[in-house]
Image (cartoon, rainbow, N blue to C red):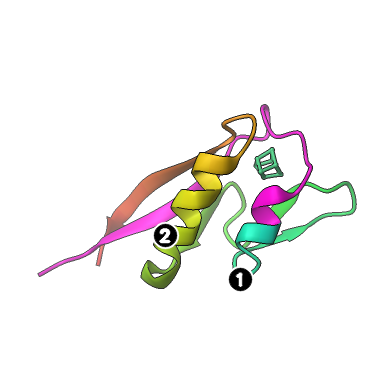
Amino acid sequence: MSRERLALHIDFTRCDGRGLCTELLPELLVRDDWGYPLGRGGRDVPVPSGLAGAAQDAVALCPVQALRLRSAGRD
Ligand code: SF4
């Protein structure tokens, strides 16, 4: 049975760069010199299945709704 892969999309037109998501997902995101999140994959950061819950928390807690989980296809 195939499993859906997820990617965390960062909308930089909304992000205010305070870095909450980088604290919630240090395995996926680091802060750049201005506090904005950087991840492998640019704006769409692949989310391993073991971090799906933490990624959902980051989406829910982003104060400006700049994060979304998207489907990145199936395994
Ligand atoms: S939590 Fe939201 S606003 Fe804050 S750095 Fe992350 S994406 Fe940007």
| Front position among marks 1 and 2 | 2
Is residue 5 toward the left or the right of residue 68 in the image? left
Query: How many angstroms separate mark 1 from mark 2 (CA)?
Result: 13 Å
Q: Which residue is mark 2?
A: 53
Q: Are marks 1 and 2 in contact (CB under 8 Å)?
A: no
Q: Measured from the top left, where is residue 13 in percent x and y?
A: 68, 27
Residue at 36% over, 68% down? 49
Q: Quadrant of the N terminus?
A: bottom left
Callout 1: helix, strand or loop?
A: loop
Between discs 1 and 2, the one toward the N terminus: 1
Q: Quadrant of the C terminus?
A: bottom left
Residue range of the region highlighted in magenta in the rendering? 1-22
| Amino acid type shown at disc 1 | Glu
Q: Quadrant of ligand 1?
A: top right
Q: In this view of the protein, which residue sits in the foreground, 58 or 45?
A: 58
Residue at 62% over, 52% down? 42
State which quadrant residue 10 falls in.
top right
| Amino acid type shown at disc 2 | Gly
Q: Which residue is mark 1?
A: 27
Residue 13: within the magenta?
A: yes
State which quadrant residue 14 falls in.
top right
Residue 63: which numbered mark, if any?
none
